[in-house]
Image (cartoon, helix red, strand yellow):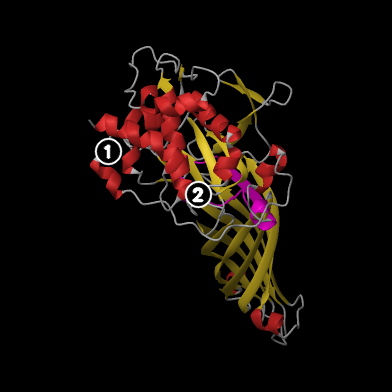
Amino acid sequence: MKKTVLIFVFILFRVNFSFADTFSDAIQDLAMQTACIGKYSAAHAGSKIRKDPDDYYTPDMLAERFAKQSGNQTRTVTFYGVCFNYAQTAWEDIEKYKNWYNDRDMYEGQFWLAGNHDDCNTIILSNPTTKDNATAIQNGVYIKTYSTSNRRVKAHKDLSGKNATHHAWLWIERADGVWFWIDPTWTDNLGYIVYGYVSSNQEEIQCRPNKSLCVNYPAYLDNLPPPPEMGKPIPPSKTDTANRAETINYAGSDWISSVMRNTFINVNYDSMNRQIGVMLTASMPFFAVSSQTLGFDKIGFTLDMPILLNKSAFLLGVDYMQNLEDDKNMRAILLECDFTRRLFNSVAWYIGGSAGLRLDFSNTEKYFEPKTMSQYSYLGFKVNTGVLITILNFFAKAEISYNNIFGLSVGAGVGFGQTRF
């Protein structure tokens, strides 16, 4: 009985029926339609032991729709394959009916094959293409990737709680600039629509599916969040929307968001490629900056390295500071360590400090008296906080700090890097 009702709902859904969120409905419908066309093959995936998973969605559920779509032909092409075949089939549907999806708040031509290898935190966007334009062959299909194809985004989770790896699905951008994803493969394997959006923390969040489109509906789906509400539409992209190489660079964002897309600092990832950079920062007393009396009597320099390890991001550096104003003769060499927390896609907040040796030669007796080095040596320290910004392979930072060499200070720095080690 339930299957009969579902067939009736599926037939009407795309033609006559919609909810308040037309975009979410459209991509869920696409995931369901693709699941009906396909059947997952464990053998094609390279498994010699595991049987094929359940095939919840079958072509007969959408027989009348497929009959209308086939036109003069009396067949619908189905497939027996793997996740890439599901993703490719969904991509081709959007390519064929792009105007239909644009009318339902898809942003221009922003739809991509999404996939990854063994790193669940790097999603690669691509599109099917001709042999002459291809940069790779995926499951026997020519695809094209671009210099900006990699996204540092954590993939969605499976039922075991692990993030997807060696998998393929689809990314689609909504007219307000929010990226959504659908997973037609797991939709077919699990019996409910597996989809969601990319959060500001650069993680794929699974959303609660439309229950009327689900053959199987476990109770825990009710605990999933709804999709984010539609926001203000973003302006048209400043590029040729027919050129995929240009389209992926802008991805529906303004030029600032486009330039700052690839973040360097992100401590929210469970695992990531290790990276390192180098930065030079200059610091001046706060009052000197505010009164525009800058000089070299009171100044500090920091040479530091932004470093990413598997589960952390921090700055290591060396500070040199001097205070030669009036009768003072102070210098310090400090070792610095700062810990980061990413705020936005390319902006990280950091906090930390440094400690080391301070040499104070400020005593100016008029007579000479032998002294040992220990009489001039003190503990030097600095505490600081600031923001670190990444623009492509360049870094910039601004900070405020306090040190016991020349007091409250402000600093700014620039750097470069993103070298893997």
Identity, as a three-letter code, of the amino acid under mark 2: Gln
**Residue 138, quarter of the rendered image:** top right
Q: Nearer the viewer, mark 2 or mark 1?
A: 1
* Position of residue 162 measured from the top left corner of the image (x, y, whole percent): 37, 36
* Residue placed furthest toward the top: 48
Callout 2 crowding tier (Cα within 10 Å): few <14, some 14–19, many ≥20:
many
* Residue placed furthest toward the bottom: 366
* Position of residue 251 measured from the top left corner of the image (x, y, whole percent): 63, 47
* Picture residue at 67% right of the left edge, 67% below the top: 412
* Position of residue 28 measured from the top left corner of the image (x, y, whole percent): 43, 40
* Picture residue at 31% right of the left edge, 23% below the top: 54
Q: Earlier in the sequence, mark 2 or mark 1?
A: 2
* Picture residue at 71% right of the left edge, 39% below the top: 242
Q: In this rendering, is residue 292 above or below 63?
A: below
Q: In this rendering, is residue 298 above or below 23?
A: below
* Picture residue at 75% right of the left edge, 83% below the top: 292
Q: Which region is colored magenta?
A: 255-277
Q: Look at the numbered discs 2 and 1 and tell me whether their residues touch, using CB distance below 8 Å.
A: no
Q: In this rendering, is residue 136 above or below 274?
A: above
Q: Is residue 183 visible?
A: no
Is residue 150 found left or right of 222 in the rendered image? right
Q: Please give the residue where the numbered disc 1 appears in the rendered image.
A: 217
Is residue 62 found left or right of 145 in the rendered image? left
Q: Please give the residue where the numbered disc 2 appears in the rendered image.
A: 202
Which element is circle 1 on?
A: loop
Which element is circle 2 on?
A: loop
Q: Is residue 12 visible?
A: yes
